[in-house]
């Protein structure tokens, strides 16, 4: 056999070409790690417990066997699982996991037309009586009764561990997913891909991943709207995408996301934690995460008292879960006015400045004092500031969020 035919299929080398006509999916794909794995038969997406990043695992042999059109649809299928939040949402109560796997695939495959054999399509086969374009919850509630005699082997994606070895000799029960899982006694058809990684991370990590998802999808939507090019994304899916930005601010989730993606870690040796590689020989490592977050409050004349009161109302919510440093500013920062807002404290709106607006002033202060993250509460009515050394996020009212004075790739969150 020629050497080139033995070479493992590398999806990363083909993704850009496959999604050339799909700018929305291409934008999302750039922000998802893709790794080859023979521990699952086809492909699957999950959230990495350590990094809270979305990952796509794929079997190189499976992808090598597909046409370009099929590869493109499998890629979009996995990204739809992320977009529709199947990976991060809580499961419905008392759910039959195998039926839920089928329901989520039906919701996605309504929008795809070139899936390989095994794709579950509304209006075809077992699902001949089901319409296209419904939600996973709708399909779950209207699932047909499956003939128990129609059974087979190789059921995958039921959320249960398998002890079958992978093609490379690895166990299917490793932390990257399962290669095979047994067919149930109810005739439920196989899912196209592997869903077993959906429940392998904590709710805290899922919260962080959800915030990252909003950021990722927002950037993809903005790029597609700006170029008036959404590819094959239907109008109904676009509406689902926009719903991601309608929810009110959950400070707890937002802060977890913000801190996770911006702060430093302080590591130290610990005899209490066992070293995984050299148990009882070398001490383990303990990671202490201490947030140092700055919140700059715009007190310029263009910020009226009602907006200032809104800002302080949000800060009172933030103080329920964290301590932070408040930096009042207009065209300057007076260090005498900077203070630490202790966790659990409540404060009334306070105006201590009323000049113009210059975002360079708080940015310089934060850059010089080594903060891990910077949140700016403002009406956005000033020129674009200098670069920030730490992650910076802007919070304003919906009116100003829609029409900011300057363009920025940094996150802008609407409150109120």
Image (tube, helix red, strand yellow):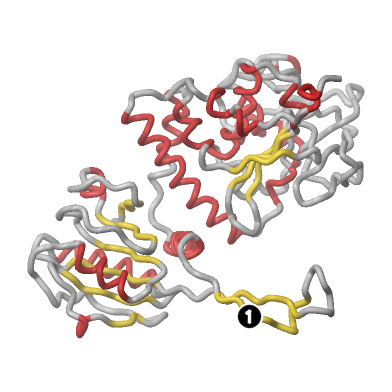
Query: Could you tell whether 182 is left or right of 206 in the image?
Result: right
Based on the displayed image, in which of its 4 quarters is residue 345 positioned?
bottom left
Q: In this view, does 163 lie to the left or right of 68?
A: right
Q: How crowded is mark 1: few (under 14 residues within 10 Å), some or many (20 or more)?
A: few
Residue drawn at x 42%, y 25% is: 230
Of residue 206 and residue 31, the one placed in the foreground of this image is: 31
Of 398 and 33, the residue lying toward us:
33
Kind of element beneath mark 1 = strand
Total numbered badges shown on the rendered structure: 1
Residue drawn at x 64%, y 26% as measured from the top left: 74
Q: Residue furthest front?
A: 3
Horizontal side, residue 71 vs residue 159: left or right: left
Locate the N terminus and report the quarter of the image it occupies: top right
Image coordinates for residue 131, horizontal then vertical, percent: 60, 18
Image quadrant in which you'd find residue 77: top right
Residue 116, above or below 339: above
Residue 122 in the image: x percent, y percent? 65, 19
Residue at the spot 68% in from the left edge and 16% down from the top edge: 67
Residue at horizontal 33 percent and vertical 82 percent from the top: 340
Residue 352, placed above or below residue 199: below
Q: In which quarter of the image is the C terminus?
A: bottom left
| Residue 343 located left or right of residue 176 | left
Residue 136 percent location from the top left of the image:
61, 33
Task: Give percent across and percent down for residue 203.
Answer: 61, 58
Q: In this view, does 321 lie above or below 194?
A: below
Residue wearing tag 1: 268
């Amino acid at each position: 056999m020629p050497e080139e035919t033995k070479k493992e299929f590398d999806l990363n080398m083909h993704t850009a070409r496959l999604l050339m006509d799909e700018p929305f999916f291409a934008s999302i794909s750039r922000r998802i790690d893709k790794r080859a794995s023979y521990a699952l038969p086809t492909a699957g997406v999950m959230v990495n417990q350590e990094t809270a990043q979305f990952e796509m695992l794929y079997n190189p042999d499976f992808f090598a066997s597909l046409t370009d059109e099929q590869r493109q649809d499998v890629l979009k299928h996995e990204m739809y699982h992320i977009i529709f939040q199947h990976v991060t949402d809580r499961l419905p109560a008392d759910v039959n996991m195998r039926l839920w796997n089928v329901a989520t695939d039906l919701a996605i495959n309504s929008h795809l037309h070139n899936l390989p054999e095994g794709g579950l399509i509304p209006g075809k086969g077992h699902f001949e009586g089901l319409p296209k374009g419904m939600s996973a919850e709708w399909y779950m509630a209207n699932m047909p009764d499956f003939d128990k005699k129609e059974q087979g082997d190789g059921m995958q994606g039921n959320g249960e561990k398998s002890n079958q070895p992978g093609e490379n000799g690895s166990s299917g029960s490793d932390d990257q997913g399962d290669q095979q899982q047994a067919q149930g006694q109810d005739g439920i058809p196989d899912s196209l891909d592997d869903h077993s990684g959906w429940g392998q991370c904590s709710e805290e990590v899922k919260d962080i991943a959800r915030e990252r998802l909003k950021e990722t999808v927002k950037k993809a939507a903005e790029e597609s709207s700006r170029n008036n090019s959404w590819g094959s994304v239907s109008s109904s899916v676009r509406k689902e995408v926009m719903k991601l930005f309608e929810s009110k601010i959950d400070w707890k989730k937002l802060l977890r996301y913000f801190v996770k993606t911006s702060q430093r870690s302080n590591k130290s040796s610990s005899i209490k934690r066992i070293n995984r590689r050299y148990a009882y020989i070398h001490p383990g490592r303990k990671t202490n995460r201490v947030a140092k977050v700055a919140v700059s409050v715009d007190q310029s004349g263009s910020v009226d008292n009602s907006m200032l009161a809104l800002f302080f109302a949000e800060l009172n919510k933030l103080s329920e879960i964290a301590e932070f440093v408040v930096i009042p500013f207009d065209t300057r920062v007076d260090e005498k006015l900077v203070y630490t807002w202790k966790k659990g404290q409540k404060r009334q709106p306070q105006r201590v400045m009323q000049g113009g607006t210059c975002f360079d002033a708080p940015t310089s202060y934060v850059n010089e004092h080594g903060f891990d993250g910077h949140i700016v509460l403002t009406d956005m009515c000033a020129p674009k500031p200098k670069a920030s050394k730490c992650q910076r996020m802007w919070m304003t009212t919906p009116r100003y969020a829609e029409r900011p004075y300057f363009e920025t790739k940094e996150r802008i969150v609407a409150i109120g």
